[in-house]
């Protein structure tokens, strides 16, 4: 296969072109020294205030919407600027000198974070792109069935609907709980397992629901699905596919630990990676049942490379993803999960104690992650968001019906931010 590097090399040779000195000077892919935002004290990954200082967020505001579209850390901003400078100086030369190496660096950092092999990772621009590629590319035959849930995100439902339009694949939905606040692990697993039939080839779920904050017990679902798959031929196994975007960068769980066949996520939410980045991770068995949708420009030596769409991208953002993974690994996945869980629990406990508030997210960390959804008597979600913003507390309204008030405590928020949010809600 002719890769972009081969094309660029040939074009450069034909024209007698070489990379300019300015391009080569900007080509160093090594990250800059880790310093606090604004060139202050060195970055200390063990200090939450130092972690927060890496991000140029507005001071004096309790920001619970950083999960929506990430702010960039200082090291990510520096990497974006470094790559942009090189591309602006000589895009042809910079791509020729760096694309192969930098793509490999991103996959290597992602694999280190996920504790997996780089070749299992495809690079995308978003969760929606990843879901569209995955559910379009899985090999399904007439009579095969996809099982999803009533609670999944639009991108999953629409990707599967388009699949039924194209080739008539059957898609069914199952309801996993009636009241999100009272969701139960055993009940969720039983309902899903009961809906699997002999024709089910794909089970499509979302790890953490953006509508309610419910976190599905993916490992328990995977174990139940393994029972259903026992005795099936490989091409008849039900693959477990997970939209992981609101667990990715929050939970300390690798794809192998979850037991899924595919994990799809954007990297510009809880990971706080460059905007416009994402990935698909697939198991060996999963990739064997996938056909790429868009031609790749990378070396076709791994399933992840083959599944990575070719063409030109916002390369400066994609390559700066390595710094985002490096930052999270420096802080530590376990510490990130514990910090997020502690802040979310404190917020849920405080909201649940307010008589005018109805909490919709489960209190237990077994069934919740960073998202916290609730209703406030006398306010619709949009009105509550506006009222809180006047108190310098940033929250969001879920884009669903019904719409709930939603908070996203993270490693960029603090205990004082939680107190500010509770004080603002109490004053409504």
Image: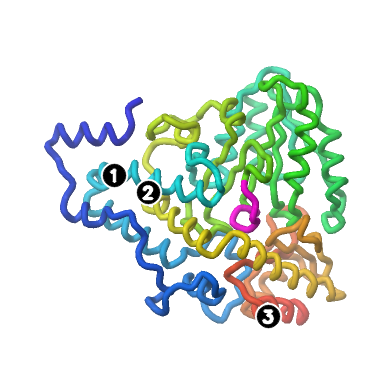
> Dominant secondary structure of the magenta stretch?
loop
Q: Which residue has dot 2 on it?
A: 315
Q: Residue at x 49, y 33 (%)?
A: 307
Along the viewing direction, whichever of 303 and 183 lies nearer the viewer: 303
Q: Looking at the picture, how far across and down is residue 230, in whole percent?
A: 77, 26
In this picture, residue 395 sits left or right of residue 29: right
Image quadrant containing the N terminus: top left
The answer to whether residue 250 is magenta is: yes
Q: Residue lying farthest top? A: 142
SS category of the residue bearing label 1:
helix
Q: Which residue has dot 3 on it?
A: 420
Q: Is residue 338 above or below residue 249?
A: below
The 10 Å Cα crowd at callout 1, few under 14, some 14 to 19, many 20 or more, is many
Cα distance, mark 2 to mark 3?
39 Å
In this picture, residue 128 sits left or right of residue 239: left
The residue range painted magenta reads 246-254
Mark before the other along the chain sequence, 1 or 3 = 1
The 10 Å Cα crowd at callout 2, few under 14, some 14 to 19, many 20 or more, is some
Cα distance, mark 1 to mark 3?
47 Å
Mark before the other along the chain sequence, 1 or 2 = 1
Q: Is residue 96 above or below residue 46?
A: above
In this picture, residue 97 sits left or right of residue 56: left
Cα distance, mark 1 to mark 2?
9 Å
Q: Which mark is residue 95?
A: 1
- Asked which quadrant contains residue 3, the reply is top left
């Amino acid at each position: 296969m002719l890769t972009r590097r081969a094309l660029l090399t040939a074009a450069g040779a034909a024209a007698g072109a070489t990379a300019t000195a300015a391009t080569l000077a900007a080509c160093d892919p090594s990250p800059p020294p880790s310093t606090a935002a604004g060139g202050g004290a060195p970055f200390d990954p063990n200090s939450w205030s130092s972690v927060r200082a890496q991000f140029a967020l507005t001071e004096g505001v309790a920001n619970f919407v950083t999960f929506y579209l990430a702010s960039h850390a200082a090291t990510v901003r520096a990497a974006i600027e470094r790559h942009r400078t090189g591309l602006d100086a000589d895009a042809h030369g910079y791509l020729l000198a760096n694309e192969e190496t930098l793509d490999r660096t991103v996959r290597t950092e992602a694999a280190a974070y996920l504790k997996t092999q780089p070749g299992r990772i495809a690079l995308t621009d978003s969760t929606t792109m990843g879901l569209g590629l995955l559910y379009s590319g899985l090999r399904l035959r007439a009579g095969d069935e996809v099982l999803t849930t009533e609670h999944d995100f639009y991108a999953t439902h629409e990707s599967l609907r388009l699949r039924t339009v194209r080739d008539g694949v059957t898609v069914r939905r199952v309801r996993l709980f009636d009241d999100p606040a009272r969701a139960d692990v055993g009940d969720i697993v039983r309902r899903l397992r009961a809906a699997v039939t002999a024709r089910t080839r794909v089970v499509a779920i979302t790890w953490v629901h953006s509508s309610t904050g419910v976190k599905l017990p993916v490992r328990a679902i995977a174990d139940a699905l393994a029972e259903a798959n026992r005795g099936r031929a490989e091409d008849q196994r039900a693959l477990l596919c997970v939209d992981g975007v609101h667990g990715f960068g929050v939970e300390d769980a690798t794809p192998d630990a979850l037991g899924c066949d595919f994990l799809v996520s954007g990297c510009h939410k809880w990971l706080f990676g460059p905007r416009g980045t994402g990935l698909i991770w697939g198991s060996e068995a999963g990739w064997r049942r996938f056909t790429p949708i868009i031609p790749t420009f990378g070396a076709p030596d791994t399933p992840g490379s083959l599944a990575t769409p070719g063409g030109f991208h916002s390369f400066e953002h994609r390559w700066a993803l390595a710094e985002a993974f490096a930052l999270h690994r420096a802080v530590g996945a376990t510490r990130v999960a514990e910090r997020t869980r502690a802040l979310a629990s404190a917020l849920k406990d405080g909201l649940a104690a307010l008589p005018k508030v109805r909490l919709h997210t489960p209190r237990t960390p077994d069934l919740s992650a960073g998202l916290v959804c609730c209703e406030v008597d006398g306010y619709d979600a949009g009105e509550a968001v506006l009222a809180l913003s006047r108190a310098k507390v940033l929250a969001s309204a879920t884009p669903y019906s019904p719409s709930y008030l939603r908070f996203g405590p993270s490693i960029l928020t603090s205990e004082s931010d939680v107190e500010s949010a509770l004080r603002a809600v109490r004053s409504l």
